[in-house]
Image (cartoon, rainbow, N blue to C red):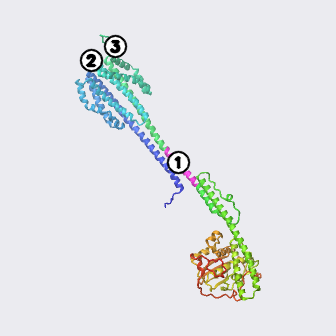
Amino acid sequence: MFRATLGIRTRILAIALVPSLTLLVLGVGAAGYLAWQGDTVKTWSSVLEAAAAQAREMIGAVEQERLLSLSQLAGDQPDPVALGRARQRLDHALLGIADLETALTDMSQGGRDAGTGGFDLVKSQLPMIRGRIDARTLPISDAYGIYTEMLRAVVFGIRVVGKAAPDAPIAFEFADTARVLLAAEAMSRAAALTVVALGTPGLPAALVDEYRSMVGYYRAELPQLAADLDGQQNVLARALMESPAWQQLGAMEDYVIAPPSKPGTHQAAPMSIGDWHQAADQVNYHMLELWQRQNEHANGVALDDAATTSRSSLLAGAGVLVLATVAFLASLWLANRLIGRLKRLRTQTLAMAEVELPDVMRRLREGEHIDAEIDSARLDFGYDEIGQVARAFNRAHTAAVAAAVTEARTREDVRAVFLNIAHRSQIVVHRQLELLDEAEARQEDPVLLQTFFRLDHLATRERRNAENLIILGGGKPGRQWRRPVPLIELVRSAVSETLDYTRVRTARLSEVFVNGSVVADLIHLLAELVDNATAFSPPHSRVDVTGNVVGKGVVVEVSDQGMGMPAADLKRANDLLRRAPDFGVAALSADSRLGLFVVARLGARHGISVRLAESDYGGIRAILLIPNTLLTTDAPGGEPLAGWAPKQHPDHPIADALPPTPAKHSAIAAISPTATAVPPQQPDDPGGEPMR
């Protein structure tokens, strides 16, 4: 299974870094887009500015050639020299605008091509058209339509480019530019038709409505433009409408549309053709000048917008970078703060588990009263999710303390039951031993006396079993000695408690005395070991008890000739003897060998070291180290042990132990993992709890 190796700090920083990087990328992208848009506006404005000058020249050239061509066709004082100069001007303008057609088409995103196809056709047929004009074979209406189509295509292209402006303010300015251009073109058309109307043939019927429409359009549009335009453009528009040329042009147009004549008479025009041409040229020049100024103003707005966009892109990029950095630093600060709280939670939780809870358990073992609610630790980390985790640990700790208190009370109750039963049994056994003493004192029959002796041993063993319960329950046996006792007497008393005491051989022991406060427990401990050795060795084998003085005290060894123990079981038994467990229901259910528990508890109580090892005969050797603190070399006239040990048969004293015989079988195997039950007992077996 995959195990995550990233720490919380890394994960939090990753969570913070992803949106920060995303914000940075978006900001850089937005700044790049704004920079690109600003550059596009600059390019668009520069191309349009260059095209405006060429377009003005183009429009002026077409309008001049249209005017002179219609004058040529009308037959009213033609001027071939001026017409030739106008044609050269148009040809030059066509060459100049050819270089900008591709850029204008790209700027209009292909929209210019949809309305300028006629321009290209007229341009290709222009020599033929001029020839027909010179030959005066081209109808006036067709000539007017051809040159008007050229100008319409030019105006359409400029309008399309203006509509492709990068943003709305620029498009709005170029919309006003297109309006001025349309008004100028309408005025130019009206001037060209005025020439025809003043000629000999007059204005063709097909162009009368066109003339009135053009005149009405530019006269109505220019005042509206004057109201809508600002700055210098407004001044130029108003100056044009107030100029004498504008008034003269209007008077001639009114004369053409509705000449004031009486029946049978003909009224002359308000001015000569020359004066009118001069006025028309002035108005046309000022109209194109107004368009040029408005176009420059629109380009200026575009350049300002480009500069603003570029500046905004830089500010946006810097702002996003600063914001992303601040967001990451804030996330880092929050992550460090969160990690700090988590570290404090971990430290305090470990202290709760490793220091405070064991201390509570120790106090419970010492019998101190514990209140789970009062003595439980309290972790205070606020009310957020970490605080909720801390409160969960508080509840878990309180529950653990409450469970420990409940268990301690249960164990105390069980221990009290053990002690109660043990004391009751001890009283009964003590009374039984008294009765046996009386019976033995009155009996002279050897057979019955032997039976009484065996009953005495069984009662003694029963008394030790009762004392086992008292010891496991934490109490102390009632028998105590005030004065030191010789070690040899103590060992003989322990051996005499064993039913097969005749198999036990006790070697000569050092002349040392054991403090009276430890005599009862040490007799009990040795009796358990000797009884264990006789129970798990062949019936006719010998059990040796030896002793020797060493630097740390006195070593007493109990060796049997049984089958020994497996290494794992021997290690487990030594671990139990080295660290006496707290006896309880759980320990009893896990291991029913009460002898080990009793020996371990007695050894731990007085600092007596007990260790099991392999004997020279392949069996088990129990090694006891009685520390110097429990010994004395003074001989205070040892207190007799009479009444402590069971009676011995006169024919089989302890010192005359039987020699070892070959074992037919061994009950030592009962310690192995496959045989942990108590070994089979003979009818006269005392029925105790062996250690193996």
Check disc 3 and give the amino acid type: Pro
For the stretch drawn in magenta, what is the main secondary structure? helix
**Label 2: which secondary element:** loop
Mark drawn on residue 200: 2
**Residue 453 in the image, given as x and y percentages of width and height:** 71, 84
**Residue 685 in the image, given as x and y percentages of width and height:** 66, 81
Q: Which residues are magenta?
A: 319-340
Comparing labels 3 and 2, the label whose residue is closer to the camera = 3
**Residue 37 in the image, given as x and y percentages of width and height:** 42, 40
Q: Which residue is mark 1?
A: 327
Q: Circle 2: is it few (<14), some (14-19), or many (20+) Cα within 10 Å?
A: few
Mark drawn on residue 79: none
Q: How many marks?
A: 3
Check disc 1 and give the amino acid type: Ala
Which badge, 2 or 1, is on the more N-terminal residue? 2
Which badge, 3 or 1, is on the more N-terminal residue? 3
- Image: 476 above or below 440: above
Which badge, 3 or 2, is on the more N-terminal residue? 2
- Image: 501 above or below 156: below
How far apart, in angstroms, are the residues tagged by discs 3 and 2? 18 Å
**Residue 328 in the image, given as x and y percentages of width and height:** 52, 49
**Label 1: which secondary element:** helix
Q: Which residue is mark 3?
A: 260
How far apart, in angstroms, are the residues tagged by discs 2 and 1? 84 Å
Decide if residue 253 is in sight here.
Answer: yes
Decide if residue 627 is in sight here.
Answer: no
- Image: 48 above or below 81: below
Check disc 2 and give the amino acid type: Thr
Is 692 in the magenta?
Answer: no
Q: Residue at x 46, y 40 (%)?
A: 311
How far apart, in angstroms, are the residues tagged by discs 3 and 1? 83 Å
Between 65 and 255, the one nearer to me in the picture: 255
